[in-house]
Amino acid sequence: MKHYDYLIVGGGVAAASAVAGIRRRDKTGSIGLFSEERYPVYNRPPLSKKLWMGERIEDIWMRPSPLSLNAQEHLTTKITAIDRQNKIVTDEFGNSYGYGKLLLATGGTPSHLPSHDVPIIYFRNLDDYFALRRLADAKNRFLVIGGGFIGSEIAAALNLNEKEVTMVYPEPHLVDRFFPEDLKHVIDQEYLQRGVKLIAGDRVTNLASENGEIMVTTKNGISFSVEAVVAGIGITPNTDLAKMAGLTVNDGIVVNEYLQTSDPDIYSAGDVTSFPYPYPDQKSRVEHEDNALTQGKAAGENMAGAHKPYTHLPFFYSDMFSLGYEAIGRLDKNLDIFADWVKFGEEGVLYYLHDNRVVGILNWNVWDGIPKAREIIEEQKVYEDPSVLKGAIRNA
Ligand SMILES: Cc1cc2nc3c(=O)[nH]c(=O)nc-3n(C[C@H](O)[C@H](O)[C@H](O)COP(=O)(O)OP(=O)(O)OC[C@H]3O[C@@H](n4cnc5c(N)ncnc54)[C@H](O)[C@@H]3O)c2cc1C
């Protein structure tokens, strides 16, 4: 039976970063990476953004690649069981592999609607991108279900490729969770002006094939036809393997500050991981690239003996047409918000405060401000008068 000093389950950026983390401390230990997908590790954000604006597939592969760091890649290979007693994993073909340390970086699976008799692309991976591309080459009218990050980005991508797009989502606004009311109107307006049809506060209740088209019906009784459907309605973390192995799981795979699960030889990183967040009231599972990258690397280093707590405050970003932002910490529309606009809706910084402390920062069309933003949040300073924050990031 093949044995790996470090065995990694997962083919995303958390898995690839873990390889880099291991190699920082251990240049020679054997590493095996197992991915269900048929492609080497790639970055997911371009699937809904840059690949629709001219970026080439060659630019999305993860660098440095696990192969270049002397890890063995097993693609199209799902791991289906872990025998913790004997430190062995088994794949879907019945092959077994021994491990010294194991990492679970299994990410998430897109949530599905109750089944309908029409095909829906639940957008998550490179094959979904290729499938949507083929549809975009052949069809013109698209339904996008979901108004969060993924739905909004895909709708923008299709619109920029001259497709007619209708969006349906239950919230009153696009990307509803994070922004104050006035800014949400700016985003909605950007989409409307570009010709995207927005059906807010509603849900798709039926999809039916009719004369080569797809008839859409919503809960509020709206009906229209499209030629193709794509959905981005959230993910469910892939915790089954961990559950079957008897590891502690809540919303995600539970780890301590060293990213160890309830079995100290098994680690977890990325979207699937529920970790002790260093800041109060923050989510303990994060579905963003920066977290997957830094947590993966930290898990790899710890697997190789670093024993360093993970205290990184991750950031995230998105682009919607000409609007783009970077954000860090807790962005909750219900917090106190101090807005430092250069020009409303076009360029500025929003500070989200809880008990007069900055807990989140949104840099709206303001770039390279994340290190300073992280510093302000980590400082935990009390701001009786938040207006003193004016220019703190823009002029840094
Ligand atoms: C279209 C899109 C756009 C995004 N845009 C942004 C953005 O703009 N900004 C941002 O911060 N974040 C963005 N994200 C989120 C970001 O990509 C994720 O946070 C990141 O990919 C998580 O990495 P991960 O390695 O934890 O999980 P994943 O990327 O989900 O990788 C998990 C991998 O493990 C494999 N796997 C699962 N179970 C098994 C098993 N049992 N055996 C073998 N392999 C298995 C899966 O097939 C998958 O390849 C975007 C995501 C998507 C889908």
Image (cartoon, rainbow, N blue to C red):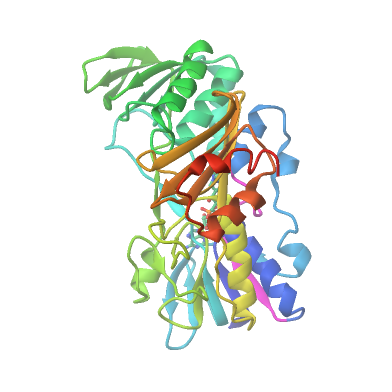
Q: Tell me, yes or no, whether the highlighted magenta stretch contains residue 154.
A: no
Residue drawn where x is 35% and y is 73% of the image: 248
- Quadrant of the frame with the N terminus: bottom right
Q: Which residues are magenta?
A: 29-44
Where's residue 211, x and y in %?
35, 12
Where's residue 335, x and y in %?
38, 43
Instruction: Name the dominant secondary structure of the magenta segment.
Output: loop
Q: Is residue 183 above or below residue 376?
A: above
Residue drawn where x is 33% and y is 12% of the image: 224
Q: Tell me, yes or no, whether the highlighted magenta stretch contains residue 35.
A: yes
**Would you identify the image quadrant in which residue 3 lies?**
bottom right
**Would you identify the image quadrant in which residue 246 lies?**
bottom left
Q: Can the viewer see residue 221 in this picture?
A: yes
Of residues 294 and 67, the one nearer the viewer is 294
Question: Total marks drawn?
Answer: 0
Q: Can the viewer see residue 212 in this picture?
A: no
Of residues 187 and 68, the one nearer the viewer is 187
Residue drawn where x is 49% and y is 81% of the image: 88
Where's residue 249, x and y in %?
34, 68
Of residues 147 and 110, the one nearer the viewer is 147
Q: Is residue 238 above or below residue 45?
A: below
Q: Is residue 193 above or below residue 175?
A: above
- Quadrant of the frame with the C terminus: top right
Of residues 150 and 187, the one nearer the viewer is 187
**Would you identify the image quadrant in which residue 75 lies?**
bottom right
